[in-house]
Image (cartoon, rainbow, N blue to C red):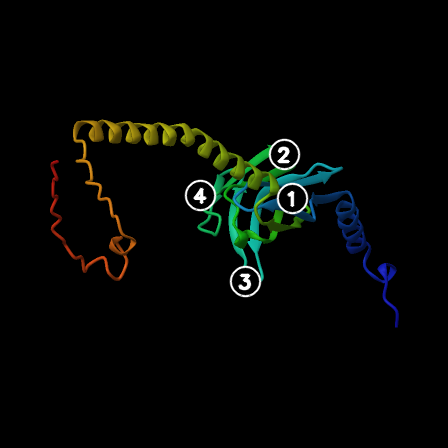
Amino acid sequence: MEFGLLSLPLPLVLICLTLWTASQSQQIIADPVVATYLRGHVTLHCRLYSKSTLKITQVLWTWESTEKKKEVIVVYNPAHGTHYFNSTFSGRVVYTNQSLGHVSINITGVKLTDKGKFTCQYTTFPSGIMKATTTLIVKGQSARARVTGILVCVLVLISCLPIAVIIMMKNSFCRRILQAANPRPASPSVVYENARDLPGSELSMDCTYTTVSLHLFYN
C-alpha cells in the first residue's frame, strides 16, 4: 500500500504545504568556518532571512567541543533582554543585535580551548526553531604579532644602550678620581745581575751575599 499527500485529509495536506513553503522561504546563514589567532578577538555572525512576516521570540548561542559538553553562552529575548550564562566565555563575550535578523557575538582574549562549534538558534513564530553552526579554529600567534614583539624588544634595547654607556663612563670617571686622590706607592724595582737570581728560578730563593772591599792605590 502506498501513502502520499493525496491519501491524507485535505486540511492536513494544506498545513503540510504551508509549513514546507515557509521553511523554503526562511533560512539562517552563518559562516561555516571562522579562523582566529590566539589572544585575539573574533566576531561570529548569524543572519535570519525570511520572505514572509516572522516574529522572533528568542535567540540562543551555544558552544561545544570534543573536550567539553554543550554550554549555553547567551540568550536574548525581546521582552526580557540579554542574559549571559556562566560558561567558558564568561566576561569575554558580548552579544549584539545588528538588526532584527542579524545577531552576533564578539569574543575577546581568545584561547586555544575556545575552538569548537558555535550554534546560533532562532525561535520564531510560526516557523519554530531554526539554527546554524559555525566551527571556530584557533591558530597560534600571528606573524604580525611576532614581528611586533621583536620590534618592541629592539626598541627597548636601543633605548637602554645610551643609559648603559653613560653608567660605564661615570664609573670609569669615578675610578680615575679615586686613583688620583689615593695614588698607589711605586713598586720597588730590583735589578738582578745574574740570571740565576731572577724570580721563578730554582736558585732565586738561595742567594749568596758577598762583601766587596775596594782598595785604593796611591802612587
Q: Nearer the viewer, mark 4 or mark 2?
A: 4
Q: Residue at x 51, y 37 (%)?
A: 79
Q: Amino acid at mark 2?
A: Leu
Res. 30 image quadrant? top right
Q: Nearer the viewer, mark 1 or mark 4?
A: 4
Residue at which label 2 appears: 100
Q: Amino acid at mark 1?
A: Phe
Q: Nearer the viewer, mark 1 or mark 3?
A: 3
Q: Could you tell me if the residues under marks 1 and 2 are in contact, i.e. CB atoms within 8 Å?
A: no
Residue at mark 1 to residue at mark 2: CA–CA distance: 14 Å
Label 1 vs 3, first from the N-terminus = 3
Determine the residue located farthest toward the front in the rendered image.
219
Q: Is residue 195 above or below residue 126?
A: below
Q: Amino acid at mark 3?
A: Glu
Residue at which label 4 appears: 91
Q: Residue at x 58, y 49 (%)?
A: 140
Residue at which label 3 appears: 67
Q: Position of residue 127 (x, y in %)?
A: 69, 47
